[in-house]
Image: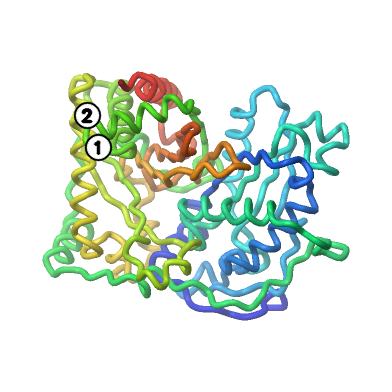
Amino acid sequence: MEDIAETLRALGPYERYSTTRHTLNLYNNVGLTAHYTLPPPLLAKPRIFSALKALINLHPPLAVTILGENTREPRFARLKSIDLEEIVQTILLPGEDTTAELDTVLSEQHSRGFELGRVPGWRCLIFRDYEDEVGGVAAEVGGNGGVWISFIYHHAIADGVSGLALHKSLLTALSRPHKNPTFAGRYVVHPQQKPYPSSLESLIPLPLSLPHIVSEVWSKVYFPPPPPPTLYTGGPTPACPTPETTRTVYKSLHFSARTLKTLLSVSRRENTTITSLLAAIIATAIFQAIPGKFDKLTSSTPINLRRYVPTERIQEVAIGAYAASLRSEYSRSPPTPSNLFSIAREHTAQINNRLDAGTADLDVGMLRWVSDLFAFFKGKLGKQREDSFAVSNVGAWDGEAGLDRVVFSQSGGVIGAAMEWCVVGVRGGGLVLGCTGCEGAVDTRVLKRVLEGVRRGVEGVE
């Protein structure tokens, strides 16, 4: 315990959901990567490290590790010190195909977890241009073409939305005037003593009705119905996970500002949302890519629960894990514009109904009824996946100067959906859709057709 300054609170059920998946190597982390366009001196290594020090002292989740992750009662613990040289890595980009290189690196990062107990549950990647680096430019003054910076973090300390907040704080810290160097010698941070944010369950009431409890226990514990034979969910989960079957494959699709503007305009016109329209486009692309014998799909859509946090405590939840999910079903139909918009509107109605119902009978509320999460997850191995795909939209960067592109990514779920789509945009800028999954979860040829279909679907909306 020589690395620990103070043991903090126990994790809540939703946070333990993430630690259990992490320790079983079923899901590793989340990522938010952004392209910074600040003046070169503000992107030099000393400047970035000073900004990261400010972030660690601003956001308590960045100052902690997790003790006893492989037990039923893990706890957060504040570290005595954090050596930034150990958790920050500089990666050189060739300059020709940045998108492909980022996808490759993010796939590798999401295939690797954290050595908890000794280091924090996050790491940072700084992508620099190869030509600048070999010329001695980047290390001294930040380079000339901007810098990509990526936060890769454990889902128990932060969710996807938190990634945007981290980059907002980093941009502020980088832009703030620094009078004197903040390090003497090595880049070591000694985190300040601050209260740790409350868990989801202690901030938001999650009431469960008796009919809901009975229905969930009946259908998921005692008498789970067999999945429909015509439901497509990719390949089954591995019975015995190996490094190969748990490896994440991440691919991203980048769209222009004009395309994003069109999506927003059409969504308003059709009384739907970008999230729902994208879900409809993805479902349509999957149906077109898989054999005709499959006529059903299911999806999961995360819902940000911060809207239910008391106003006086909203700042407390800037960084943390506060989400639930909504499950939707789709039936095969002719791929016409009218059907596409009908699917999107139905998905929007489901989300609105869920939001109108408040926090009652949410899926995360049932977690406190799961006595052994380890057995719960192990029981899903070697089985058919529950969902065909998931769509997680963290929203849009507000367009603040100094950052012009954002990429959202995450680990493939070994027992999760066959494809997990990560959505993020920039106000006044473009849109990035990332598709993540585990090796073998989806046939390579099918995945290629789905990616092509989604690109055509997004660019063809009018």
Quadrant of the snapshot with the C terminus: top left
In front: 57, or 251?
A: 57
Between disc 1 and disc 2, whose residue precedes? 1
The residue located at (32%, 25%) in the rendering is 285
Number of disc labels: 2
Picture quarter containing residue 100?
top right
Between 119 and 173, the one nearer to me in the picture: 173
Residues at marks 1 and 2 touching, judged by CB atoms closer than 8 Å: yes
How far apart are the alpha carbons under marks 1 and 2?
8 Å
Residue located 67% across and 67% down the image: 118
Can you identify the residue that label 1 sits on? 272
**Residue pictured at 46% horizontal, 52% vertical:** 161
* Residue at point 24%, 34% (across, down): 344
Secondary structure state at the residue bearing disc 1: loop
442, 277: nearer the viewer: 277
- Above or below 409: residue 204: below
Q: How is the image coloured?
A: rainbow
Q: Answer left or right for 288 relative to 332.
A: right
Rendered image: mark on residue 341? 2
Give the percent coordinates (x, y) of residue 150.
Answer: 62, 46
- Where disc 2 sits, the SS reads helix
Q: Quadrant of residue 299?
A: top left
Q: Give the x, y percent position of residue 83.
A: 75, 62
Circle 1: residue type: Thr
